[in-house]
């Protein structure tokens, strides 16, 4: 396709659509019909450009023109500002997590299984620990470092540090999912770290201290990582096995879901960071600290299950509205 000839042939139509879409006054019936007809023609033109003669500048111009035409035809997006935030918290995030629970549960089982296997193996073979850590570092970890980690810094700064670190791990698990290997590496590193530290503590007779310090914040924190890992793997699977849809469409939908979950996990990991900074090192009894962590975890699961199930039954998908997505060419 000759791009210059294509532009010369259709430029008048594009300018007319731009003129109608930019009108400040209300369009009359004939103008509205003309705008819709031109919108459809320009959508076809964009599809031709993208498939037969990829030209980034022209494709960008037509995409902007279609966005203006769509806004003029259907009006601005219905949800803005605080309404959008409320919808994200009450509908989009819980629905997305609920719809992908199988992926998150699979990640949780695999991670906990790998860590537990390491705990049991190191407890049964404590002499193997010296092959990974020198005995001096083992004693330092068991007698001092593990407990002091939660209290050696001011609680406020420690909470911020934990929050940003957990957010980074979750973001890597989410957005490296398109590679699959990246998310698997992040999850495996997390499982090995948990298994090694826990194995050293348990093999040294410090199991009660390990679980007493890790469980209050760890239940909610690991749930966030499991959700991120599950969504990340689902994103990678979207382009490996897209089903009947084009890979680009399948990956775009999975990517939007990953974005929703990334924003939602900010709040989840903030809560776990506050618990880790203020509850885990506190003077409360072990039972009280673990109970607080369990209540936070129960609240999160209840929130996802109740609101997620309600949203799914109401037809919500967690995705943006259909008229706000990109224009797609029908495929067979």
Image (cartoon, grey):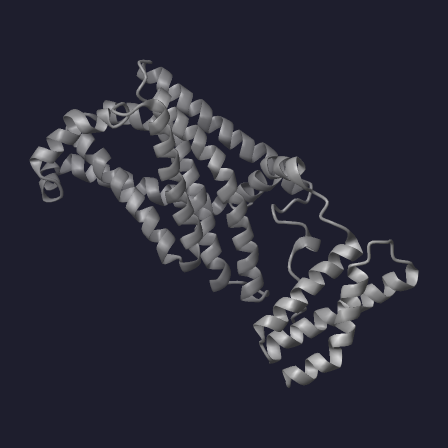
Q: Is residue 265 left or right of residue 90?
A: left
Q: Residue 257 versus residue 167: which sits nearer the camera? A: 167
- In this rendering, the count of numbered labels is 0
Residue 6, position as x, y percentages in the image: 69, 82
Q: Residue 164 versus residue 126: which sits nearer the camera? A: 164
Tell me the quarter of the image containing the C terminus.
Answer: bottom right
Residue 320, position as x, y percentages in the image: 64, 49
Q: Which quadrant would residue 202 be assigned to in this image?
A: top left
Q: Which quadrant would residue 89 be assigned to in this image?
A: top right
Residue 134, position as x, y percentages in the image: 9, 39
Depicted 187 relative to depicted 277: above or below:
below
Depicted 322 relative to depicted 220: above or below:
below
Residue at the spot 71% in from the left edge and 72% down from the top edge: 44
Tell me the quarter of the image containing the N terminus.
Answer: bottom right
Residue at the spot 78% in from the left edge and 73% down from the top edge: 13
- Seen from this angle, which residue lies furthest right? 29
Q: Is residue 158 left or right of residue 19?
A: left
Q: Which quadrant would residue 95 be assigned to in this image?
A: top right
Q: Is residue 298 left or right of residue 84?
A: left
Q: Is residue 13 left or right of residue 227?
A: right
Query: Visible in this render: residue 82?
Result: yes
Query: Visible in this render: residue 216?
Result: no
Residue 129, position as x, y percentages in the image: 12, 39
Q: Residue 226 versus residue 89: which sits nearer the camera? A: 89
Residue at the spot 39% in from the left edge and 49% down from the top edge: 172
């Amino acid at each position: 396709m000759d791009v210059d000839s294509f532009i010369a042939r259709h430029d008048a139509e594009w300018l007319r659509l731009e003129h109608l879409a930019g009108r400040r006054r209300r369009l009359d019936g004939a103008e509205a019909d003309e705008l819709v007809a031109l919108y459809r023609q320009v959508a076809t033109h964009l599809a031709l450009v993208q498939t037969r003669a990829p030209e980034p500048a022209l494709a960008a111009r037509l995409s902007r023109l279609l966005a203006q035409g769509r806004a003029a035809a259907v009006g601005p997006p219905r949800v803005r500002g605080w309404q959008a935030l409320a919808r994200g918290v009450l509908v989009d995030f819980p629905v997305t997590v609920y719809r992908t629970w199988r992926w998150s549960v699979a990640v949780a089982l695999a991670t906990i299984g790998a860590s537990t296997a390491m705990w049991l193996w190191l407890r049964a073979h404590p002499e193997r620990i010296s092959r990974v850590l020198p005995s001096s570092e083992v004693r330092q970890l068991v007698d001092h470092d593990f407990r002091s980690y939660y209290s050696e810094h001011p609680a406020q700064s420690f909470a911020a540090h934990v929050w940003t670190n957990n957010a980074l791990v979750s973001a890597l698990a989410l957005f490296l999912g398109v590679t699959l290997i990246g998310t698997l590496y992040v999850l495996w590193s997390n499982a090995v770290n948990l298994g090694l530290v826990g194995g050293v503590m348990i093999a040294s007779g410090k199991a009660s201290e390990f679980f007493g310090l890790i469980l209050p914040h760890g239940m909610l924190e690991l749930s966030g990582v499991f959700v991120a890992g599950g969504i990340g793997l689902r994103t990678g699977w979207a382009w490996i096995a897209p089903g009947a849809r084009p890979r680009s469409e399948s990956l775009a939908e999975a990517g939007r879901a990953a974005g929703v979950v990334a924003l939602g996990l900010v709040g989840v990991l903030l809560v776990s960071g506050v618990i880790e900074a203020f509850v885990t090192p506190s003077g409360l009894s072990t039972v009280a600290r673990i109970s607080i962590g369990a209540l936070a975890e129960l609240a999160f699961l209840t929130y996802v299950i109740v609101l997620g199930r309600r949203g799914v039954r109401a037809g919500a998908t967690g995705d943006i509205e259909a008229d706000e997505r990109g224009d797609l060419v029908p495929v067979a």
